[in-house]
Image (cartoon, rainbow, N blue to C red):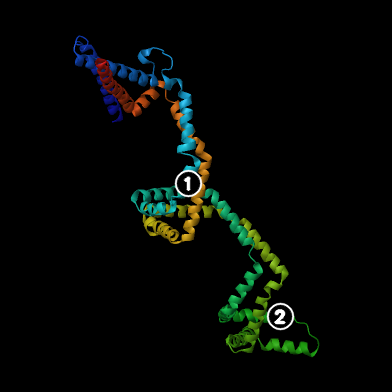
Amino acid sequence: MKNKKSTQSKHLASTSLAIMGSGFIATIPFQETTWSAILHGGFEAGLVGGLADWFAVTALFRHPMGLPIPHTALLPKNRKKIVSALVNTLENDWLSKESIQHKLQNVRVMEKVMPVIRKEVSTEPVKREINTLLIQIIHSIDVTKIAPLIEKELKKALRSIDTERVIEMAVEGLIRYQYDEKALDYLLDRIEQWLNKNETSRQLGRTALRAIEGLELDGFMQFALKSFQQMLNEEKLGSLLQNLLRNALMNVKRSEDMNRQALLLKVKEEMRGITERKEWMDVIETRKKAAIDDWELSGKIEEILTSIQQRTSAFVESGECMESYILPFINRAIESVQNDTDKMNRMEAWIQHQIGMLVEENHSKIGKLVEENLNKLDNETLVNMMENHIGKDLQWIRVNGAVCGFFIGLVLAGVQALV
């Protein structure tokens, strides 16, 4: 559009000059009368004015008619000065650091940005981008590098566990839930099952007779022992011992039995005294450390992490994660910031500070950027650009010169005629 207007202005200026020239030539033969002489003088002055202004306008950009006339082609010759002046004006006047910072300080960035963020974050393109970013983050996690670190920290935590405290808590838990009594009852049941077997009677009798035969007594005791052996055989002695043990076992199984209570009390004392046996604790601690050191966890941890990674990725890709967790979390965070005046002010101050630092550090780049872009243009391109943007007004100078010259010529020719 600008190029079209500039071309129209050029045509108009050329047309005005052509009109003046044609009028000047056409009125040369008709100067006998006063009015024709005055008209001829007007066209002559208009032609001179138009040509003068054409020369002046053309001299700004190039040599008129290609002739190297002094003080013409001013723009190409003074290109460096013009660019330097433009950059200096841009940096120090139009876009100075102070003016930019002052304008930015009057802009409440957070108040303008937060509603935009809240609106845009709910749009489908933004949600897709967030989903894509989350998936990329999930897949970028290298579980093969994380697994050894987790294994190391896990083993470190296991080694630091107070073994004595764990045993004490375990013992108290066993006692609190009466596992000592349950264990005793289980043992008594197993003994009872063993006693009720037929072969148990023979084993007891055989063992007892062997024990009696191994006794060495003197005098009457030896005689009494021999008499006792003749009265009892293996079967009778085994049955006797079996009944005795069964009766004793039945008594111990009763909760009110004194022997049972004494036995349980002793068991509890022994259980609570485990941590006081240093040699036992040393063995337990050594076994614990050896078991932890020999425990190969890295492969299993890597397998678990890979499975979690795959499930998390699938959950994010399904879109449920975005709708159920990510989007509500972002909206709550935005709402929390908007409702917290102090937080808004702190963030605003931080943003203004960062913008100020950015302007301070990069202000000189504005002029350099303009200078670099202008230096990329050759003289012809730069001249054409200037003509396209300001050529319309310059061409009107030519039109004005021709028209003003015409009317001035009329006046001067009229005065001359009167004189």
What residue type is disc 1 on?
Answer: His
Rendered image: mark on residue 404 = none
Q: Is residue 109 visible?
A: yes
Compared to residue 100, the image places residue 243 above or below, namely below
Q: Earlier in the sequence, mark 1 or mark 2?
A: 1
What residue do we see at 44% from left, 29% from top?
A: 373
Mark 1 secondary-structure assignment: helix
What residue type is disc 2 on?
Answer: Ala
Compared to residue 244, the image places residue 302 above or below, namely above
Q: Residue furthest top?
A: 29
Give coordinates of residue 124: x percent, y percent.
34, 50
Rendered image: mark on residue 102 = 1
Q: Are the residues at dot 1 and dot 2 in contact (C-beta closer than 8 Å)?
A: no
Mark 2 secondary-structure assignment: helix
Q: Residues within 10 Å of mark 2 (few under 14, many from 20)?
A: few
Give coordinates of residue 16: x percent, y percent.
25, 20
Q: Residues within 10 Å of mark 1 (few under 14, many from 20)?
A: few
In which quadrant will I find the C terminus? top left
Q: Is residue 142 visible?
A: no
* Residue 219 shown left or right of residue 355 in the figure: right
Residue underneath mark 2: 211
What residue do we see at 42% from left, 22% from top?
A: 75
- The image shows a total of numbered marks equal to 2
Q: Nearer the viewer, residue 76 or 69?
A: 69
* Residue 303 shown left or right of residue 380 in the figure: right
In which quadrant will I find the N terminus? top left
Give coordinates of residue 159: x percent, y percent.
64, 61
* Residue 76 shown left or right of residue 196 in the figure: left
Compared to residue 7, the image places residue 353 above or below, namely below
What residue do we see at 63% from left, 64% from top?
A: 161
* Residue 96 shown left or right of residue 266 in the figure: left
